[in-house]
Image (spheres, rainbow, N blue to C red):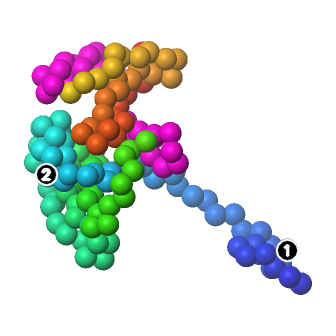
Amino acid sequence: MTSTPNQPTDDTTKETTMPEFPGITHIAVTVTDLARSTAWYAELFDSAPVLDEDVDAGAFHHTVFALGGGQLFGLHKHQEAGAAPFDEHSPGLDHVAFSCGDRAELEKWGSRLDELGVVHGDIVDAPYGSGLSFRDPDGIALEFFAPPS
C-alpha cells in the first residue's frame, strides 16, 4: 500500500478537534529609517517602545511597541534592505488595520491624525464596517477600522 504524506495508512481516520483559530499576537513591518519610524510610531501610539535590540540570528534590528490586548507592533530594519518601496499591489502585505469600537472612535482618531500632521483619507463607510486610511513614513498602508453600527 502506498501512502500520501499526512494521510493515514489504514482504514482508520482520526479527526483532530482544534480550538478556535488563534488571534494575531504581533505584526512587524520593515522600515527604511528606524529612528524616523520609531519616533513616528511612538507619537501615533503615544508610547515608547518596550524592546529595541539587534537580532543576530535574523541580521536585523527591531523595535517593538506594546499595544492594547497584549498585541505587539514591531519595526524591523534589515542589514540587507531591499530597494523597492512599499506597494500594496505587490504580493505580501496590503495594509494593517487597528481596531476601533465604533465610527465615533474613528472620528477621534481622525482628529488625532490631524494633530500629528498625518495625512489621511476620509472615513469610508461600507456594509462590513468603516475605515480611516493613512500611511506611515515608508508609505505602508495603515487603517483604523470599526465594525458596522
In front of the other: 80 or 51: 80
Magenta-highlighted residues: 88-117
The question of residue 90 being in magenta is answered with yes
For residue 94, what is the image quadrant? Answer: top left
- Indicate the quadrant where residue 107 lies: top left
Three-letter amino acid code at the position of disc 2? Ala
Numbered label attached to residue 110: none
Instruction: Write down the residue under mark 1.
Output: 11
Q: Earlier in the sequence, mark 1 or mark 2?
A: 1
Which secondary structure lies at badge 1? loop
Q: Residue 35 carries which label?
A: 2
Q: How far apart are marks 1 and 2 (CA)?
A: 59 Å
Residue 77 location, x and y as percent? 25, 59
Q: In which quarter of the image is the N terminus?
A: bottom right
- Left or right placement of residue 148 versus residue 121 in this view: right
Farthest residue in the front direction?
83
Is the residue 33 above or below the residue 132 in the image? below
Which one is closest to the eye, mark 1 or mark 2? 2
